[in-house]
Amino acid sequence: MDKLLLAKLAKEHNSQRKIAEVVGCSYRTVGRWMKKYKIEITPTMISKERLDECIALGYGENKSCAHLNVSAGTYRRSMKHHGLKSPHKDFSPALYFDNMGSCVLCGKKCHKRTICGECTARATRRGIKSALVFLKGGKCEQCGYDKSIAALDFHHTNPNGKEIALNQANAQKHFLTYVEEIKKCELLCTRCHRERHETQDLKNADFKTVSDATMQQLLVTMGTL
């Protein structure tokens, strides 16, 4: 490959791929010959006047690159060379809050979103629970209550086998993980769930170890509340 031609094309700020198109070979071949001849491509540099023009127009990196018809790397290199800073890097609280909208569900301020993150997470949790409740029959297995899914709980028949808190189900885990977990549970309404736990607690409690004096003191304390 002609050394003079290669040096001339490199000096004109052409990339290896552009040089390869001109000489009719692959860019890897161009790279090998440039390494052999010790030729380096002079990086493209945008003039300070053109960059100042973009800054005056309030263009960020993407708009500036489109306006100047250069790559993001060339734009950043030129900005750094001239000691300039892109307007979008300077955070403006006033501009930020002026562009804020309101969540359509709760009315909370949110930036460039129709629904805030809190409502999105709440809707996701409710959607997952609705699907899990449907898979378990959609009603309390003990009394048949089915009016509100908010009043339905997943009761682990074996507390030691509990791996996931289903009341905190979210999109961070795969849905099939929750499907496997509900196989260890009964679907109970809030009242039946509390009664079930009370029955288990009374069954496990050993009241024989409580002395009569301690029980009497406990009853007196409860009477004074």
Image (cartoon, rainbow, N blue to C red):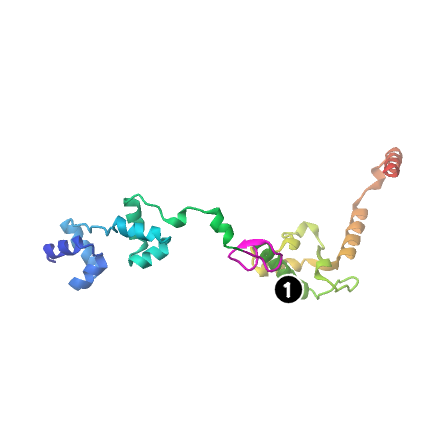
Say left or right for 156 vs 219.
left
Q: Quick one: label 1, few (<14), some, or many (20+) residues within 10 Å?
A: few
Q: Say which of 61 and 201 sits in front.
A: 61
Relative to 134, residue 90 above or below = above
Relative to 144, residue 204 above or below = above
Mark 1 lies on a secondary structure that is: helix
Residue 127 place in picture, x, y as percent:
62, 62
Say left or right for 184 vs 41.
right
- The rendered magenta stretch, by its main secondary structure, is classed as loop
Image quarter (top left, top right, bottom left or bottom right) of the N terminus: bottom left
Residue 94 place in picture, x, y as percent:
49, 48
Residue plotted at (58% across, 60% down): 175
Indicate whether residue 31 is drawn in magenta: no
The residue pinned by badge 1 equals 131
Indicate whether residue 114 is drawn in magenta: yes
Residue 145 place in picture, x, y as percent:
77, 63
The residues colored magenta run: 101-116
Residue plotted at (32% across, 45% down): 84
Count of marks placed on residues: 1
Q: Say which of 70 and 15 sits in front.
A: 70
Image quarter (top left, top right, bottom left or bottom right) of the C terminus: top right
Residue 18 place in picture, x, y as percent:
21, 60
Q: Say which of 87 and 143 sits in front.
A: 87
Mark 1: amino acid: Ala
Q: Quadrant of residue 212?
A: top right
